[in-house]
Amino acid sequence: MSINNPESKPPDIPRQQIEPVRFSFSSYTGLRVTVLGLGLFSGGVATARFFARHGAQVTVTDRKPAEKLQPSIDALAGLPIRFVLGEHREGDMLAADLLVVGPAVQDDSPYFRLALAHGIPVTTEMNIFFDRCPAPIVGVTGSNGKTTTTSLIAAFCRARDARSVVGGNIGHSLLDEIDAISPDTTVVLELSSFQLHRLAWIGRSPHVAVVTNLSPNHLDWHGTYEAYTEAKRQIVRFQTAADTAVLNADDPELRRWADDSAGRVLWFGLDAQIREGAAVYNGAIVFRDGMREHSICPVDTIRIPGRHNLANTLAAVAGACACGIEPAALAPVLAEFRGVVHRLERVRELDGVRYYNDSASTTPESAVTALRAFDDPVVLIAGGYDKGMPFDAMAAEAMRRARAVVLIGVAAETIEKALAASGGPLPVVAHAATLKEAVRRSQQLACPGDTVVLSPGCASYDMFVNFEDRGQQFKTEVEGLVSARERI
């Protein structure tokens, strides 16, 4: 039976009224579990492995064919799992005792709605982890900077206790490690808007919630900016009096969130006056805790470039202090922290031109941030899958800072139109059919002293497996460039 049969379509349930059936299973043995969405990230794999190892009868279904999901299939080799790939089947939803939906599955999915309409319990990989995790959780979210902030908080925590673990949207599911996590382990999670949207189903928020900033993102999934911000708000909505929220005082929306948390609120900011939290005073990063002020380190000792990364550092400092880490212990970690892969990652310098990989830039706002990180002229490689966000601010910043813009992907023409509408003299605009061609064209357009940066401002789905694949291909192409002197 197909869901396309009009008689079998589930009723339309408004997003705000979606509330899956609560469930409690004392044992998973024999439980019929359907995993809706395997994907190529670790969440679907970890979910299927978790239930299979706990004795459940697991069915994994994904619209993508097997050849596009082979790494995930290989990771589940040897486990008693039934795969239904290249399609979804109504029967796999209706036969389930529990449906686990992946983050790519939207609320208007007819298969998700079918399960709701028939009273079948629905959950997510992250919700399972929150339900079973015995340790305090530090959760980090935001439109930009959350991976850098998550990684830095994790580095602080590991310096105190090597057993600390990091995962979530950062690319590694911790569900595989849940049985090894003890109550005195510190867990640091990067949380996406998709994960937080559904964390509301179980009414849970992290013990320490860090929010870097907010700007439009994933409007193709959430529908509106209001729905997106409401999803993010779940990170503080269910906190208790024993919890802590760390919020960006420079962000007008986040300043309004202080009353949403029942716990303590710490702030961070580059511009706002901070009484409790992390800030910059007299050229140093400081943490203020009531009447006390702790000087941590001079700003110029921070290795990661850009004003935005200074803000990320402040968020991480406040988050670490909220975990009970002494401010004096933070400076050695900051002195060694060099950032994370695919986020303004320096690749090489050739013929006086520096090349940076910022493939994790999947929003126009993050591309603006990357452009502002450099004082020298920039040759920007941008474009990709269009998530429905405006490119006006990105185009305006490129007009001010870019010598040239090389465009790739399905959003190329939309970005070029935004550049043309910005007014004033345009930088050189070129189109490339492949990333290899874009790198070669950027080398031709750059002058000594310039910076070439891949900061797409778009998702990667039109040309690449994910942003990591895009970034790795960029690094490979840049490493393969030959000096102009060698070509003579």
Image (cartoon, rainbow, N blue to C red):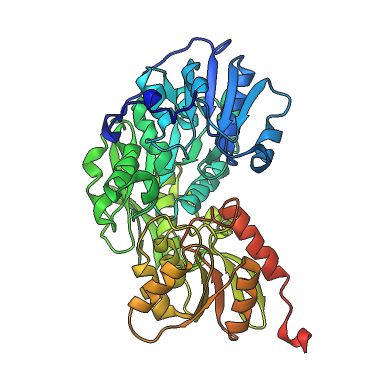
Q: From the top left corner, tell me how far across and down residue 95 is, in percent.
A: 50, 16
Give the total number of marks visible in the rendering.
Answer: 0
Pick the quarter of the image with the C terminus: bottom right
Q: Residue at x 50, y 17 (%)?
A: 96
Q: Residue at x 40, y 79 (%)?
A: 399
Q: Residue at x 30, y 48 (%)?
A: 224
Residue 263 in the image: above or below residue 344: above
Which of 267 and 146 lies nearest the eye of the viewer? 146
Q: From the top left corner, tell me how far across and down residue 478 is, in percent.
A: 67, 70
Q: Residue at x 63, y 79 (%)?
A: 443
Q: Is residue 125 left or right of residue 262?
A: right
User: In the orientation shown, which residue stands out farthest toward the bottom?
Assistant: 488
Q: From the top left corner, tell me how far across and down residue 189 is, in percent.
A: 48, 40
Residue 30 in the image: above or below residue 70: above
Which of 41 and 182 lies nearest the eye of the viewer? 41
Q: Quadrant of residue 163?
A: top right
| Residue 250 visible in the displayed image | yes
Q: Is residue 369 left or right of residue 480?
A: left
Q: Quadrant of residue 123?
A: top left
Q: Quadrant of residue 415?
A: bottom left
| Residue 173 visible in the displayed image | no
Q: Is residue 430 left or right of residue 83?
A: left
Q: From the top left corner, tell me how far across and down residue 276 is, in percent.
A: 29, 49
Which of 437 and 346 lies nearest the eye of the viewer? 437
Which of 232 and 79 lies nearest the eye of the viewer? 79
